[in-house]
Amino acid sequence: MLIMANLLTFVVFVVPRLHASGWTSSIVLVTFAVAGFQILVEGPRWQMVPAYVLTGLLLLVWGVERLVKSNRIAKDLLSNRLVVGGTIILCLLDLLLAASLPIVFPVFHFPRPSGPYQIGTLTYHWVESRHEIFSTDPNAHRELMVQVWYPVKGNVSSVRAPYVQDASALSASVTRVAPLPWFAFNHFQYVTTNAIPSARVATDTSTYPVLVFLTGIFGFRQSNTFQIENFVSHGYIVVGIDQPYTAAAVDFPDGHQIIGWTHAQMDPFTNQSLNPVEPAPMLNGIALKNGNMPYLAQDVSFTLDQLSALNKADPNGILTGRLDLKRVGTFGISLGAMVAAEACHIDSRLKACLMVDAAMPFDVVQVGLRQPGMWLTRPANDMRLEHWKESDITQTLNTMQAVFNKEPAGEGYYVSVPGMFHVNFTDAPYFTPLGPLFGFTGPINAQRGFDIVNAYSLAFFEQHLQDHTAPLLDGPSKYYPEVIFSSKSISYHPFR
């Protein structure tokens, strides 16, 4: 709206007939009012800075014009062709920038998911007895922020939950490790989801199966909202965990915040879980022989314990008795996929495991999983296009394939999607429509990528948690012909 007002004001200034109509003052003042309204009601965002500047520039030109009759300097300025021409060019460039930035970095919206349910959400803070090994404080205990999304029906509330609670903290944390300005994601505070805070759970089913979601390093529990909301709309309760020190930033109710570690800080312990070496890396005086995966996987076990308590007595009075903890699965992306695999390795309460685009921990590669598993990834050439190291490509594909090969017949699935980059498995394609141009996202159509991920991941849990028939898992699909699909009965070429 502000950009359109600026455009109209600019046209009035440069078209003589319109400029002489007497409407200039009114239009300038209305544009200024629109700018003020946008800042006060919606809130300022960095993409709109050129529009604010243009509003100020047009107001300045209007003010100079008003001084012409009484001020000789002002009259000389407006009669100087260089000044007038420069001002017009400056306004045009500013207008172009003002129109472009909100398109390139939009306040995006999540489409309505495909299932019959609406979505409710609650957030919990849980502290456990384990010592926090990543903290130098000997008295620190491991604590988690956990968000639960659940099925809702018949709720017409217009209030929608924000995408993230503290966009500025997330932005500042992510840009510590990415070549972006500190304010790059501040506009996420204006992004809303389809979830309704504290809505009542749908009552057409007594309980719902549970999925635990684990994000990647520098991620956040909402990073796969496109996928989470789709699961919930089809009758699942999804539990997203912010794991301190691996998540971008975790904000706690008392106001303290834990910023995620950088790759340089965390990678030695992650690599130890993938490729154990001697001597093992030390963390605050403790040798982590098996790396960080066993510790991070215990977050999932602790969460399951807390969900059991929640199912008996939810302090919010909403989820009591509504979780089917005999049908629990987990899914994760990147580091979260490694943690998901490790959690399935150590905790038999998890009945199905979906792992997205990540190498598998050493102990999981050695013995395999006890649960049905699905691996979602992409061909090696897409990893190369994304400039992954050849060693990382080999390790990622070979270890996923190794664990897949250990799955019993009918319980393992390997889904490779050409054209995907790593972040295409997250919400990141929504962040900018120019992702492929920047090399940020892969060449696949963003929505097509979302549709494929949602279709295969939902089919997997439908079959192995709900005991529903999922024809999509029977073989290659005519609906997704580009997908390279493998089950234990179909051959697979890992570097195709």
Image (cartoon, grey):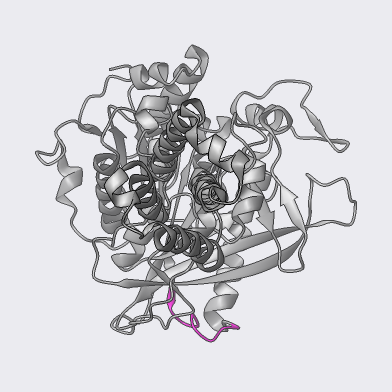
Residue shown at the point (41%, 24%) measured from the top left: 397
- At which x and y percent is residue 414? 31, 34
Q: For residue 318: magenta?
A: yes
Left or right, residue 197 beside residue 252: left
Q: For residue 255: magenta?
A: no
Left or right, residue 461 beside residue 242: left
Whether residue 219 is visible to the viewer of this picture, yes or no, is yes
- At which x and y percent is residue 462? 27, 58
> For the stretch drawn in magenta, what is the main secondary structure?
loop
In the rendered view, tell whether residue 350 sits above or below residue 339.
below
- The quadrant where residue 423 appears: top left
- The quadrant where residue 179 appears: top right
Q: Nearer the viewer, residue 225 or 4?
A: 4
Residue shown at the point (38%, 55%) measured from the top left: 5
Residue located farthest toward the top when viewing the structure as drawn: 390
- At which x and y percent is residue 412? 32, 40
Residue shown at the point (49%, 41%) measured from the top left: 337
| Quadrant holding the C terminus | top left
- At which x and y percent is residue 348? 50, 55
In the rendered view, tell whether residue 4 sits above or below residue 273.
below
Left or right, residue 349 beside residue 228: right
Whether residue 298 is visible to the viewer of this picture, yes or no, is no
In magenta, the rendered stretch is: 315-323
| Quadrant holding the N terminus | bottom left
Q: Nearer the viewer, residue 454 or 107?
A: 107
Q: Nearer the viewer, residue 26 or 468?
A: 26
